[in-house]
Amino acid sequence: MLDTKLYTLLKVAEYRNYTQAARSLNLTQPAVSQHIHALEHELGVKLFERSGNRLILTRAGEKCVSAARAISNLYSNLRFELSGSAAGIREVNIGITHTVESNHISEALAKYASDNQDVKIKLITDTQANLKKKLKNYELDLAIIDGSVTDTSFETRLLDTDRLVFVTDVSHPLAEKSSVTLDEIRKEKLILRLPGSGTANMFIAALEARDISIEAYNVILEVDNVATIKDLVMQKYGVSVLAESACLDEIMKNRLAALPIDQLQMRREINIIYTKNLQYMDFPDEIIRAYNDVR
């Protein structure tokens, strides 16, 4: 069993209040305070500063909370692994970014889990930044993201390559063309991913490489969810720039048209990333094989 002081630290960090943390832990407030002071004495650092009625984590406190969260997740994973081993089941937690969620990846993972009765997959969708944090905190075993990764604490396996395209409903006048120009897009109402997403960043960077600002375009809506953007485009509220792989199903069903954009090369990687101590080192290769089977 883990040191109870670590659980106390996590609860105090969550509530930023001794009283609420004590209530959650079914302890007295003095006991919670004693746990925190004992940790501070053991580690030789101050974990919290007081600001009015709230507690603020110090920089050292943030590091300790991150470590405590990782230790807690490792312990939880160990308990499941031990119980799962007895039942012959292994659980794999996988994170995917919103863009690749609409790709063949979900289908590949579903097929793999269906074909391998000893595997239980838990799929979590989040931003790339949050997925990386969850990997480092051992909340995830691996993640599938759009774009490359420079963080050397991760191992990377290339799953596929993709490109960004201009997307419109099939009745739009531009849908009949073989490609579109930047000037033609400038006249349209754009529905884009939120700033900070891989798709938005790549499109903006491609424009800036040609000394063009995104402000020159009529962006009427920014949405986090790719499925929502596709629905709005199909309902003729505007056009978009999305990953081609995210629109394959709608393109095949003739519900959306996807065209390359003249003068913009927007190719990107789809990568599997994981920490160097991944428990199931064969799993990335198994995912790649399953993905290739459903493409």
Image (cartoon, helix red, strand yellow):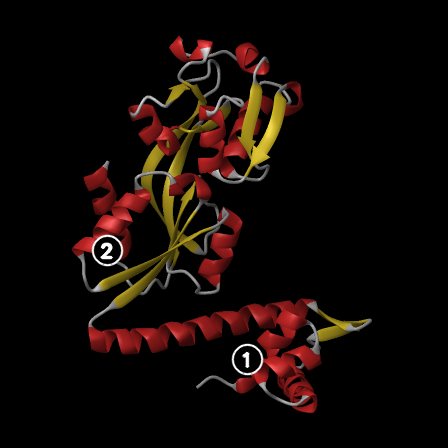
| Viewer-side residue, 69 vs 175 | 175
133 left or right of 105? right
What secondary structure is found at the residue carrying circle 1? Answer: helix
Q: Quadrant of the C terminus?
A: top left
The answer to whether residue 74 is seen in the rendering is yes
Q: Which residue is mark 1?
A: 7
Q: Quadrant of residue 101?
A: top left
Tell me the mark number nearer the camera, choosing from 1 and 2: 2
104 over 119 or under it: above or below:
above
Q: Which residue is mark 2?
A: 113
Residue 1 image offset from top left, x and y in percent: 43, 86
| Viewer-side residue, 229 vs 136 | 229
Q: Residue at x 24, y 57 (%)?
A: 282
Q: Residue at x 44, y 45 (%)?
A: 97
Q: Residue at x 56, y 23 (%)?
A: 190
Q: Quadrant of residue 145?
A: top left
83 over 204 or under it: above or below:
below
What secondary structure is found at the residue carrying circle 2? Answer: helix
155 left or right of 112? right
**How far apart in space, not on screen, are marks 1 and 2 (Cα)?**
33 Å
Amino acid residing under circle 2? Ala
Mark closer to the chain start, 1 or 2 = 1
Residue 233 image offset from top left, x and y in percent: 48, 25
Amino acid residing under circle 1? Tyr
Count of numbered labels shown in the rendering:
2
Outermost residue on the front side: it is 235
The answer to whether residue 287 is seen in the rendering is no
